[in-house]
Image (cartoon, helix red, strand yellow):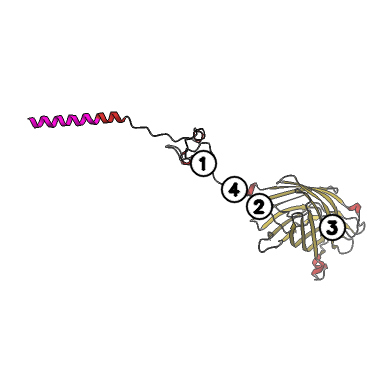
Amino acid sequence: MRLSCVLAAAAAVSVLGGAVRAQEAGPAPAPSPIPTPEEARSSPPGEEIDPADAAPAADDPGTSPVPLPGESAARAKPASPEPASLPPVQRSNIFYSPTGHILPAAVVQAGLSVDTGGSPVGEVAIGLGDVAEFGLTVTDLLRARHEDDGEPDGLFPYALAHFKMGVAEDRMFRHQPAVALGFRKSFERDTDEHRSRVAELYLALSKELSSALTVHAGASFWDASLENLDGDEVTLHGMSGGSAKNQLRPFGGVELRPLVRAQIMAEVFWVPELVYRAGAPEDIRLRPELAWGVGYDLSDWGQVQAGVRVPDIGEVNLLDAQIFGQFKITTTRLRSALGR
């Protein structure tokens, strides 16, 4: 009986002592909240706050906060990097003659030209895989004349399709010029009681010698056919008697850039001239033409050009010269859409 009373008294004393010690220690301190960057910057001197302990601001674009419970993973995903910039669009032709450059893949270029001859002409081309270019052109460069009156007239409209493939500058080895091999072929044109066709195979080279100077050079191999109502047909290769030198002609040009957006250009090229004869076989001749003028880049997508073209350098007939103006648009929207 005495033993049980002693044990009960000892247990009561133990419980009472634990309660007294808990009361003396006080309540457990609550965990301190993580300060925000604003609180860290406004803390009084002497209280150093570790930047690693500061909570990132929710509107800080350079941080990727940990998603809260219930927050979607898509919202917490970091922003995707910007797409790579498009390559610069080089000049695919000077005014009329081709260059060694081609349009980048899926880049579309369209142009409209008018001159004092009164014939609006145009072209459209698209780059294929950074190694080729395809396009359609409506031109009045080809001329025809009756031998009796001797006054040539531009054939309008004269439609051609062209395909050009090549390698960009410095692509294969250092100081390598841009090289392009192209072919232009006209649709058959039936007018003035004659049926005609032309074709051109050319090799063009372009080299940027400095930030202010680029030179272009190449060679064209021409062929053409002319047929009258009687079915008599003459061809340029037939008239050459098998000699390729009568069909081969050089061309070239120079491009100066005195200002960032302005260019001064000049070029020499060759085109066929069709000669109609009464009571005799027709004739086909290659005539040199000269063009010079300026270009100005309105923006990355638009350019204007203006200049003078002399249809036949050999005759030096300024009354036959033409003043022309061109407007070109280049768009990369198709390339951007395909990239996305």
| Image coords of residue 275 (percent x, y) | 86, 60
Region of the chain picked out in magenta, as a range: 2-18
C-alpha span from label 1 to label 4: 21 Å
| Image coords of residue 82 (percent x, y) | 58, 46
Q: Residues within 10 Å of mark 4 (few under 14, many from 20)?
A: few
Q: Hey, which quadrant is residue 218 in on the image?
A: bottom right
Which numbered disc, 1 or 2, marks the residue that appears first in the sequence?
1
As shown in the figure, which amino acid type bears the numbered disc 3?
Glu
* Residue corresponding to mark 1: 63
**Between marks 3 and 2 in the image, the one whose residue lies nearer the viewer:** 2
Q: Which mark is residue 289?
A: 3
Viewer-closest of 296 and 93: 296
C-alpha span from label 3 to label 4: 44 Å
- Residue depicted at x 72% and y 49%: 110
Q: Secondary structure at mark 1?
A: loop
Q: Does residue 168 appear to the left or right of 249 in the view shown?
A: left
- Residue depicted at x 88% and y 64%: 280
* Residue corresponding to mark 2: 87
C-alpha span from label 3 to label 2: 33 Å
Q: Is residue 249 above or below residue 133?
A: below
Contact flag, marks 1 and 2 (Cβ < 8 Å): no
Question: Residue placed farthest to the right in the image?
Answer: 149
Q: Which mark is residue 83?
A: 4
As shown in the figure, which amino acid type bears the numbered disc 2?
Pro
Q: Secondary structure at mark 4?
A: loop
C-alpha span from label 3 to label 1: 63 Å
Q: Residues within 10 Å of mark 3 (few under 14, many from 20)?
A: many
Residue 6 shows up from this direction = yes
Q: Secondary structure at mark 2?
A: loop
